[in-house]
C-alpha cells in the first residue's frame, strides 16, 4: 500500500491546502491550523493519496488512529476504505477514527455490524452567528455588551487592539510564561502542548493561513487570540483566546474586536469544544450558540 506518512510541518501547508474545504465540514478540524497546533500532542502525520486526498495518521495513548480524509465528497467512501485497508494490512489493527465530522458520518452511512459509531458529546464545537458576536446586539448578549462597554470605559485610550505580527512573539511568550505560572502545577498535560503549539505558530506565522489579534494596555500585552478561516463554510475558527482574567470585559473586548478586524464577513464562528468542563461549557453557552458541529468516534469491529 503506497501511503508515505510524514510529520506535519509548517511548509506542508502548500501541499495540504488544495484539499481543505473540498467537502462540507463545520468542525474546527476542517482547517489546517488545528492539525498544526496539536501536531506534537497527537504525533500528527499525513500522506497524499493519488493526488486526490490527504490521509491522516495520529497517536493517542500509544495507539494509532486516523481522521476523516480531506477529499471531495464523492471520493470520501473510497478514501475512507483505503484507511481501513491501511490499518488492517499495514498496522494489523482495526481502524479507529476520532473527531469524525457529522457530515462525513452521515454521508458514509456505515454498516453498524462493521463499525461502531459513537457521538463524542463533550467534543462538539460551538457555532455562533458572526454578526451577533461582532455587534453584541440583542437581549441574549446584553451582559456581554455591558462587560465590553465596562472595559472601554475603564481603559479608554490606554487600551489598543492590534493585529499581532510574527515580530511580536517575544511579548506573547512573556504573556504565556506568566499565564502558565498562574495555572500552577495542577494543570492538564495538554496545556503545555498548547503553549508549544502557539510557539510554533508564532515562529512560522508568515507561511501559515493564520489571523492573530491582541490587546495592549499601557503598551503591555494583556490578551491575544489566534484564528483561521474556512472559506467553504464562510466560518471563522477561533483556536486560541487568552486574556488576563483579572481585567473585567477584556475577554469580551478581544473576542469582538478580533472578529470585527480579522473576520468582518464571516457568517459563522466556531469557538471549538468545551472538553466536558462545566465552567467552559457555561462560558460558551452564555454566548448563545446557534448550533453545534458534532463529532464522532468510528471503530471498526473485527472478528
Image (cartoon, helix red, strand yellow):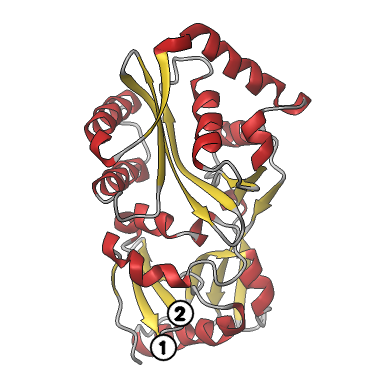
Q: Position of residue 84 (x, y in %)?
A: 48, 84
| Furthest residue in direction top, as rendered | 154
Is the residue under label 2 in contact with that under label 1 (CB below 8 Å)?
yes
In this view of the protein, can residue 303 be seen by the observer? no
Say which residue appears at 55% left-offset and 72% top-offset: 22
Number of other residues with Cα within 10 Å of mark 2, as a class: few under 14, some 14 to 19, many 20 or more: many
Quarter residue 17 falls in: bottom left
* Residue at image coords 51%, 53%: 229
Q: Regarding mark 1 in the picture, which secondary structure is present there?
A: loop
Q: Is residue 217 left or right of residue 288?
A: left
Q: Residue 85 versus residue 140: which sits nearer the camera? A: 140
* Residue highlighted by disc 1: 50
Q: Nearer the viewer, residue 192 or 286?
A: 286
Residue 53 - label:
2
Residue at figure coordinates x 50%, y 7% from the top left: 154
Q: Residues within 10 Å of mark 1 (few under 14, many from 20)?
A: few
Circle 2 sits in a helix, a strand or a loop, which is it? strand
Marks 1 and 2, how far apart at CA: 7 Å
Q: Quadrant of residue 241?
A: top left
Q: Position of residue 224 (x, y in %)?
A: 40, 32
Amino acid at each position: 500500500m503506497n501511503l508515505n506518512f510524514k510529520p506535519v510541518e509548517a511548509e506542508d501547508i502548500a501541499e495540504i491546502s488544495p484539499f481543505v474545504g473540498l467537502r462540507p465540514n463545520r468542525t474546527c478540524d476542517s482547517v489546517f491550523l488545528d492539525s498544526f497546533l496539536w501536531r506534537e500532542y497527537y504525533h500528527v502525520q499525513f500522506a497524499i493519496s493519488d493526488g486526490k486526498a490527504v490521509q491522516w495518521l495520529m497517536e493517542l495513548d500509544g495507539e494509532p488512529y486516523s481522521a476523516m480524509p480531506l477529499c471531495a465528497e464523492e471520493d470520501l467512501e473510497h478514501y475512507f476504505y483505503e484507511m481501513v485497508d491501511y490499518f488492517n494490512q499495514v498496522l494489523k489493527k482495526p481502524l479507529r477514527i476520532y473527531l469524525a465530522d457529522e457530515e462525513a458520518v452521515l454521508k458514509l452511512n456505515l454498516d453498524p455490524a462493521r463499525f461502531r459509531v459513537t457521538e463524542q458529546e463533550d467534543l462538539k464545537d460551538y457555532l455562533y452567528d458572526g454578526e451577533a458576536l461582532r455587534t453584541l446586539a440583542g437581549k441574549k448578549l446584553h451582559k456581554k455588551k455591558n462587560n465590553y462597554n465596562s472595559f472601554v470605559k475603564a481603559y479608554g485610550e490606554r487600551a489598543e487592539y492590534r493585529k499581532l505580527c510574527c515580530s511580536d512573539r517575544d511579548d506573547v511568550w512573556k504573556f504565556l510564561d506568566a499565564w502558565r505560572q498562574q495555572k500552577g502545577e495542577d494543570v492538564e498535560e495538554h496545556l503545555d502542548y498548547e503553549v508549544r503549539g502557539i510557539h510554533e505558530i508564532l515562529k512560522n506565522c508568515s507561511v501559515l493561513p493564520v489571523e492573530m489579534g491582541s490587546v495592549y494596555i499601557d503598551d503591555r500585552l494583556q490578551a491575544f487570540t489566534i484564528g483561521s478561516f474556512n472559506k467553504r463554510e464562510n466560518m471563522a475558527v477561533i483556536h486560541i483566546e487568552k486574556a488576563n482574567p483579572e481585567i473585567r470585559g477584556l475577554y469580551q473586548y478581544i473576542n469582538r474586536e478580533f472578529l470585527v478586524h480579522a473576520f468582518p464577513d464571516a457568517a459563522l464562528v466556531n469557538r471549538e469544544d468545551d472538553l466536558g468542563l462545566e465552567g467552559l461549557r457555561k462560558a460558551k453557552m452564555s454566548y448563545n450558540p446557534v448550533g453545534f458541529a458534532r463529532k464522532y468516534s468510528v471503530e471498526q469491529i473485527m472478528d
